[in-house]
Amino acid sequence: MSELKVSAIKEGTVIDHIPAGKGLKVIEILNLNTLNGGTVLLAMNVHSKKLGRKDIVKVEGKYLSEEEVNKIALIAPTATVNIIRDYRVAEKFNVEVPEKISGILRCANPNCISNHEYTVPKFYVISKEPLKVRCHYCERTMEEEEILANL
Amino acid sequence: MQGWKGRDVISIRDFSRDDIEYVLSTAERLEEELKEKGSLEYAKGKILATLFFEPSTRTRLSFESAMHRLGGSVIGFAEASTSSVKKGESLRDTIKTVEQYSDVIVIRHPKEGAARLAAEVAEIPVINAGDGSNQHPTQTLLDLYTIKREFGKIDGLKIGLLGDLKYGRTVHSLSEALSHYDVELYLISPDLLRMPRHIVEELKEKGVKVYETSDLESVIGELDVLYVTRIQKERFPDEQEYLKVKGSYVIDLEILKKVKETLKIMHPLPRVDEIHPSVDSTKYAIYFRQVFSGIPVRMALLALTLGVIE
């Protein structure tokens, strides 16, 4: 089933194995819900051997950069990314939570200097499962819920 | 061990056991030299800038005294209202400016992470003298120095941390630093103010034996060191609860009947009423000697980061 859906776009990116219910958030984080974002298809609650249920997001005409992939890794660590060229899977890679996260996440601590001065916010991943990061500046630990709210 | 010249002192997390030991032994060396000669000249011609965006008498005076004792001089401000911050200048610009006037910067700032940012911006070494509720590494180093001077070692000691372990910055950093040593930690606090779980887990992972209790009397007889901190009223939902808790953690002559002869009582100060003044003159009290430790430890950090000693 999902093979068919993948090959249905000519050029672009298919993000597969998104935990069920996180597909809309992926679209939001990647800013795909804008008028110039190209055609976006979202499949929700698709049957999956690996996850039980999963979401799939397909983006026509857009190849994800590494930085964007990192953003997804935080919300959907199980996701796989397929780069599609001429209806074929040209590249396929797993999303991985990086050791360091830079520039895509804001610190949840309102008293952190990174929320008051010009800085590039940086975080160290201290646990991938459950997801926990520590702010490079204020050293406060953020857990998944706070992380998702500050992407 | 990293080289010391030009190094920043921002968080106790950045310190290995070797780093800590090196600071402590350098402090000891400088303390002896100072006793012998009265004043030193290692930092002659060097200028320390103390940038206190938030007032702190003790830490600022201690750093300034340490720099003078090293033969250096000091510039700076003691509160943000007398600096250009009041005109809206960014921390970044303040640091960029001040580093043109000085060789090392000591900063205290109400925002967490401010010292880390200052260190990234500045070419010269930056020493954190407290960033909001985050870190105060020189306090931790002087605490360790005090323990080491009293006992000749840190390994093998039973150390009790008493009071507000939930919000207390000093006890978080101290326990983190102590995790490099073979110690037993007794965490004594009201249930409401227990040490955050992630810190307790981290301590256990590093092999520290941790005991948690709310009952001071049941463990005080075990301890070599009792580190007392203040419990703040505003942490409690109602005043009655606060008064009840406060009363059970007051160190007075009565409770000292139950302790080891060799117990040492420490406190980061200022204290309010958690240690009765009658305790000050007992052999157990070392909190004013602890204040003195700030001088050799800060001298060591200034001299090492300036690169005027090795």
Image: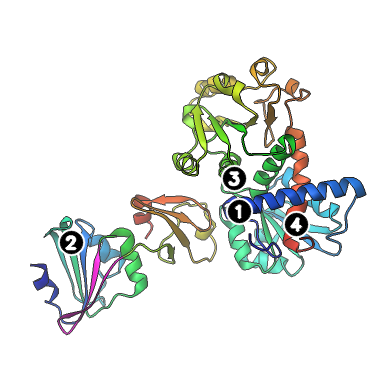
| Whether labels 4 and 1 share one chain | yes
Mark 2 or mark 3, which is nearer to you?
3
Chain letter of the residue beneath label 3 in the structure image: B
**Label 3 belongs to which residue?**
B177
Check disc 3 and give the amino acid type: Ala
Chain letter of the residue beneath label 1 in the structure image: B
Secondary structure state at the residue bearing disc 4: helix
Q: CA distance from mark 4 to mark 3?
A: 20 Å
The image shows residue A150 at horizontal and vertical percentages of 38, 57
| Whether labels 3 and 1 share one chain | yes
- Residue B302: which numbered mark, if any? 4
Mark 4 or mark 2, which is nearer to you?
4
- The range drawn in magenta is A79-95
The residue at 76%/53% (across/down) is B300
Q: CA distance from mark 4 to mark 1?
A: 16 Å
Check disc 4 and give the amino acid type: Leu
Crowding near the residue tagged with mark 4, few <14, some 14–19, many ≥20 C-alpha atoms within 10 Å: many
**Label 1 belongs to which residue?**
B15
Specify whether residue B297 is painted magenta: no
N-terminal of the two: label 4 or label 1?
A: 1
Q: Is residue B59 visible?
A: yes
Image quadrant occupied by the N terminus of chain B: bottom right
